[in-house]
Amino acid sequence: MEVTASTIAGAQAEQKLRELADTQVSLRRLAMLIVRGEPPEAVFVAVTKEALRQFGRGSASVIRYELDGTTTLLAHAGTMGPHVRVGKRWAGHPPTGLTAAVLRSGRPARTDDYHDIPGGEPYLCEGLRSAAAMPIYVKDRLWGMIAVGERTQPG
């Protein structure tokens, strides 16, 4: 029994090291874009791709909060729906969804099931069930958020 527990613990430790190494590679790729002076749009696209690769199985988006109360979708990776329009302002996000929650609180937020969110239908049609978002601060001001969505069916 001890050999089995030791083997499992070793395999788990090895998996954690692989995940850590993969995260470091992702961060290095992003840092290199910034060091090379790539335009912000290219960095946002790379960030969404890396976030999707690391954390999601559906979609990832970088969203900026505008001073007029709208938002702009700066980059998106993964599943798509008619509401996904990169570079366009968006005023119709659900009032109880992630975009509004992060804007209201300035803190991370999550939606466990878009069936429970009034206005969540576009996300369900996109094939998403749940999502989590982290605020992005620039010079101590809430600038936007990054969100990662999870599909209803893993795969």
Image: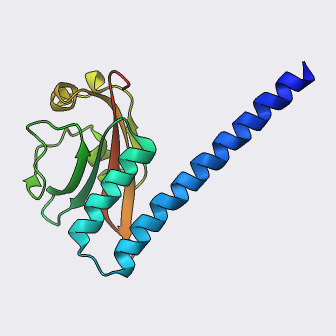
Task: Report the number of numbered marks.
Answer: 0
Please state which of residues 154 and 147 is positioned toward the viewer in this rendering.
Answer: 154
Q: Quadrant of residue 98?
A: top left
View extreme (top): residue: 1
Looking at the image, which residue is at 23% across and 61% down?
Answer: 64
Does residue 32 appear anywhere in the picture? yes
Please state which of residues 21 and 88 is positioned toward the viewer in this rendering.
Answer: 21
Relative height, residue 83 to residue 31 (above, below)? above
Q: Position of residue 140 (x, y in %)?
A: 40, 73
Looking at the image, which residue is at 11% across and 59% down?
Answer: 87
Q: How is the image coloured?
A: rainbow
Q: Is residue 1 left or right of residue 54?
A: right
Does residue 133 appear anywhere in the picture? no
Q: Quadrant of residue 97?
A: top left
Q: Position of residue 90 (x, y in %)?
A: 11, 51
Q: Quadrant of the C terminus?
A: top left
Q: Is residue 86 left or right of residue 146?
A: left
Looking at the image, which residue is at 78% across and 37% down?
Answer: 10
Relative height, residue 152 to residue 133 (above, below)? above
Please state which of residues 120 and 68 is positioned toward the viewer in this rendering.
Answer: 120
Q: Position of residue 65 (x, y in %)?
A: 22, 60
Q: Quadrant of residue 21?
A: bottom right
Relative height, residue 38 to residue 3 (above, below)? below
Looking at the image, which residue is at 66% across and 49% down?
Answer: 17
Q: Quadrant of the N terminus?
A: top right
Please state which of residues 21 and 58 is positioned toward the viewer in this rendering.
Answer: 21
